[in-house]
Amino acid sequence: MLPFPVHPFRPRLVDALRGYTRAQFAADAGAGVTVGIVALPLAMAFAIASGLKPEQGIFTAIIAGFLISALGGSNVQIGGPAGAFIVIVYGIVERYGLANLLISTMLAGVLLFALGFLRLGALVRYIPISIVIGFTNGIAVLIALSQVKDLLGLRIDKLPADFFSQIAVLATHVHTLNPTALAIGVACLALVVVWPKSYAMPATPATRLDRLRRHAAQVPGTVIALAGATAVVATFGLDVETIGSRFGGIPQALPSFELPSFSWTSAKQLVIPTVTIALLGAIESLLCARVADNMADIPRHDPNQELMAQGVANVVTPLFGGMPATGTIARTSTNVRSGARTPVAGIVHAATLLAIVLVAAPLAVHVPLAALAGILLFVAWNMGEWHEFARLKRFALTYRTTLVGTFLLTVIFDLTVAVEVGLILSCVFFIWRMSQLFRAEPLDDEALRRTTGEAAPPGVHVMGLYGSLFFGAVGKVEAIVEALPAGTRVLVLECQRLVQLDTTGLDALTQLLRALRKRGVALRLAAVNEQPRSLMHRSGFDALLDEGAVAPTLAEALQRARA
């Protein structure tokens, strides 16, 4: 028996299969096939942009997609490689190598499972939205920048991971631009943008155009763009870089099991990459699950079970050469719009990808990398919340500083630094805002008459404490002594609106009591709430006060002061 509460391992699939009907399976199967087709170009594009082979993205979508759906805490979430990981994975591969990426992913999986097992999934929600928007937009910019090389068909062996170094390398090689690759990439991007996406067509379309639009909307634009570009390159033999020319194609077989070489020496160097992968995976998956909950009439997700499933997926997938995986908003949204209501759809999605690999892998040799770059540019644009920059002027300076700072740090340095600095700024700003809410204000005779029916006796000064007296607000208590009127014999602190007191605030009251006694002024407290009263009693502060110095009401405190 563990001495602390843990979360039971109970996948949502277990509850979803109770009373499962043939009609539900038909809807889930159709949605799963649709998502599987959508996931194919994205999985390849994410892997290539991360500096990996395209099959590593596909195998990740198959294995992690199956495990996350079968073991997760959401009815409709689709797991797999995500655009948010591109920058992180690329940097880890450049700095530590592929083997250490696999080890980092597995260690991150263990950390994710532990977060869910210890019921810490709710802590991810405490990350301020300004930080989430800042690093999401920063990652989107970096993804778009990483695709310029393939979009323009530039002859660059390998792009560096640093933002400014990438710009410098792209600028020095712009003379190698391939107009054919640029035309293919721009055409694919335009097609994905203008392709009909609405699944909410009338049951009886009014015109032939409506019927065509309804049928066309069932086929994802990314699939149409990829298939069209591949067909054009294969038919006309265009001089552009393809998956075949760079990677030799995709193996028409199942991934092989292989343990990555592990040593504690290398593991000690992977603490930051591990935490980065785990943190980003947790944020992405739980944000995606929350979005999915609001899109459909389904049971709300279990964040702890979802994190445990993410952990299992990220431990198992690297054993087959896969990359980090998490919940994906684009594929999950497609899953919901296609009619999915249970995790069976995610399992079918994984089976669909596996069938495509086993049957159609040889066709991938003709896929132009410029087409994948165009698709990823669209993904990067949809990934960012660019309207938040236009709305910044509506928010406080603290919010603007955190969002813009996190964005710039993500782009210029890396995600880990951005999140760390963003969290520190958020904490500092929160402390500052809370300290501004605390007030120590004198109560004049008019206010006292409204409250108690009488004015303060001669020589009695009354002040009200408002808000939370904690370490960030003690300066306002220290200033009380200097602000006392001449001739004050008794200071009454009305604490009815003092909602919280910490030990630093209590120490400030203790120092106030000593300073008042040196001046011959007595201290009285009135209407002290439960939390401050409990701390005063446990710390022994009330023993320092005179007998009867704490009154239940302000009126009684004034009567005692008069006596």
Image: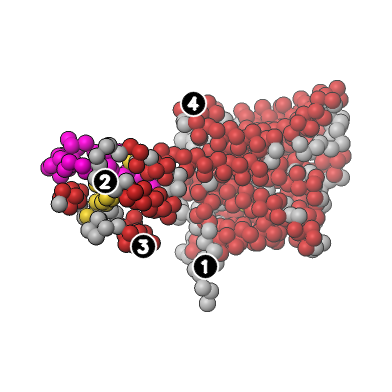
Task: Mark 3 or mark 1: name the one nearer the start of the chain.
Answer: 1
What kind of element bears circle 1?
Answer: loop
- 436 inside magenta stretch: no
- Alpha carbon separation for disc pair 1 and 2: 50 Å
Q: Residues within 10 Å of mark 4 (few under 14, many from 20)?
A: few
Along the viewing direction, whichever of 329 and 130 lies nearer the viewer: 130
Q: Which of marks 4 and 1 is nearer the N terminus?
A: 1
Question: Percent from the top left, x then y, of residue 9?
Answer: 55, 67
Q: Name the residue under label 4.
A: 393
Front: mark 2 or 4: 2
Note whether residue 256 is visible: no
Task: Identify residue type, mark 4.
Answer: Lys
Q: Are marks 4 and 1 in contact (CB under 8 Å)?
A: no
Tag 1 residue: 6
Say which residue appears at 77% left-offset and 39% top-offset: 161
Amino acid on which disc 2 is placed: Leu
Nearest the viewer among 125 and 538 is 538
